[in-house]
Image (spheres, rainbow, N blue to C red):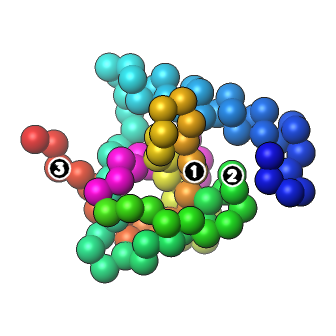
Amino acid sequence: MVAGESKTTADYLEKLFGSLQEILLSKESDLKQVVLTSDAPRFHYCIGEKMFLEIQNGAELYVMDSKSPKEGKVYVFTPHHWNSGRIFLILEEHLQDLEPN
């Protein structure tokens, strides 16, 4: 746990990441996959860690439509590592849709 984080918050985030992972693996996923634009900054606010973290080029990102935008920023989920994930707040203008192949 991060300093200042309660066990309740950590449990909630763990359940949320688990359900998001299940959605990603299901065939009926309604999550919209996006990538950062080439001119986007690489550090964005992670709500779980409560700090700015780097997002690598080409990272797997999904816009969370279930959460409404906050001050022009959308909630974006990235699986990050197996069975864990991170949720970032990113300005919509820094995201572009990933075209299906």
Whether residue 43 sits left or right of residue 99 in the image: it is right
Figure disc tally:
3
For residue 75, which quarter of the picture? bottom right
CB-based contact (under 8 Å), mark 1 and mark 3? no
Whether residue 83 sits left or right of residue 41 in the image: it is right
Residue that badge 3 annotates: 99
Residue that badge 2 annotates: 48
Whole-percent x, y for residue 10 in the image: 78, 40
What amino acid is labelled 3 in the image? Glu
Residue that badge 1 annotates: 87
Of circles 2 and 3, which is in front? 2
Of circles 1 and 3, which is in front? 1
What amino acid is labelled 2 in the image? Gly
Residue at 50% x, 72% y: name it.
43
The answer to which of marks 2 and 3 sits earlier in the sequence is 2
Q: Residues within 10 Å of mark 1 (few under 14, many from 20)?
A: many
The answer to which of marks 1 and 3 sits earlier in the sequence is 1
Whether residue 72 sits left or right of residue 3 in the image: it is left
The local secondary structure at tag 1 comes to strand
Which region of the structure is painted magenta? 58-68
What amino acid is labelled 1 in the image? Ile
